[in-house]
Image: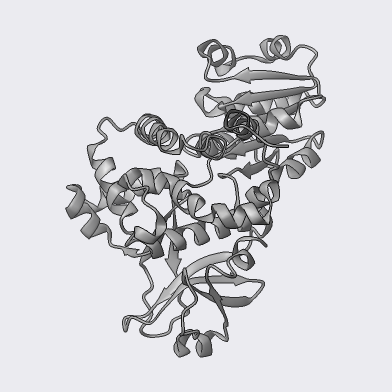
Amino acid sequence: MIFSEYNLLKWYNNIMYERFLESEVKSKIGKGKAIILIGPRQVGKTTLINKILENRNHLFLDADDPSIRRLLAEPDTLQIKRILGRHSIVFIDEAQRIPHIGLTSKIIVDQFDNIQLILSGSSSFDLANAFNEPLTGRKWEYELFPVTWEEFEEKHGYVYGEQDLENRLIYGFYPDVLNHPGDEREILKQLVSSYLYRDILAFAGLRKSESLEKLLLLLALQVGSEVNYDELGRSAGIDKNTVSRYIDILMKGYVLFSLSSFSRNVRNEIKKRKKIYFYDNGVRNALIGNFSQLELRPDKGAIWENFLVSERLKQNHYKYPFAKMYFWRTTGQQEVDFVEEADGNIHGFEFKWKTGKSKRLPGTFSQHYNASAHFIDRSNFRDFVIR
């Protein structure tokens, strides 16, 4: 069948990616605990839950609606019973917007044992604090990220993946970006302006965005490099403590994550520095305003490393939650791009876009930690991003 350009775009717009968490969430329905799904805006949380509940009797409550927030802010048991009616499943979307949602959820879980409660939220700002104490022992909690390379390639196939890899390095894996080829820049621009500079400022109680914007730009330009909070503060015009606070906010908002330095007391190891990465390459490139082709870019290595590390993070969250991720460097500039510790074994990884001549980890690292060495490049990256 030959697609016209119109039909091809229409087909793209109806793509539904199979998410790894679908089977996990399905398996917990009816097990007597609340199911909580958190993650960035627009990564497909609502779509995923709606797909799971498509043929089930359920009540959908959208907490973006002020009337829903009023109903659920401080209800008593009788009010909750009236709201739930005869539904066996209740899905509350954007639950972090509801005051005291943790206590309301506790009432539902404790008093209505025939009802499955499902909640989603777009940040860990309020949800973690709201649910930790009231729902201790009463919840299954999951994090959903942008589409993984594995989910992407399972949908489109190996050949398409090979052809589209460089686009994904530039534009990332947000579902709306994937589903609207040709409109990626506009979608990412709107995502950055609405989510980063509106929602996160509101969640964090920040009034001005100028310092946050400067800090984000600095971090975007230093992806894959160690960051110094004092230097970042001087460049952004804020103090070290404010830098730390902003970075913590951006991590809780699923914009950034960090790797700590790996150390087991080798004398010259750097022990307290961090590397900062973005959950999505498209967001990072939108922040610096650069969507140039990969071969034309001086930051090609940073883009490649951010892609690999963010994909590994997703895989570990979904499949290997006890794996620990680090980087390693000494004061003498010996370094390993990525270190993973899992099941008592230590693995060191070096990243190159193209195969290099040198394939050897620093002897100090390999010998002291009895670490296995892995070299990831364009030809074998699937070994790293699909587990």
Residue sitting at x 53%, y 12%: 70
170 or 321, which is in the foreground?
170
Residue sitting at x 70%, y 50%: 154
Does 116 sit above or below residue 80?
below
Residue sitting at x 45%, y 41%: 253
Quadrant placement of the C terminus: bottom right
Visual colour scheme = one colour
Q: Is residue 178 visible from the viewing direction of this image?
A: yes
Q: Position of residue 116 (x, y in %)?
A: 76, 28
Q: Is residue 317 visible from the viewing direction of this image?
A: no
Q: Quadrant of residue 158?
A: bottom right
Q: Position of residue 76 (x, y in %)?
A: 64, 14
Total labels: the figure holds 0
Does 1 sit above or below residue 336?
above
Q: Quadrant of residue 58?
A: top right
Q: Position of residue 236 (x, y in %)?
A: 20, 48
Q: Is residue 109 left or right of residue 245?
A: right
169 or 278, which is in the foreground?
169
Quadrant placement of the N terminus: top right
213 or 129, which is in the foreground?
213
Q: Is residue 87 left or right of residue 304?
A: right
Residue sitting at x 28%, y 62%: 228
Does 340 sit above or below residue 277?
below
Q: Position of residue 318 (x, y in %)?
A: 66, 52
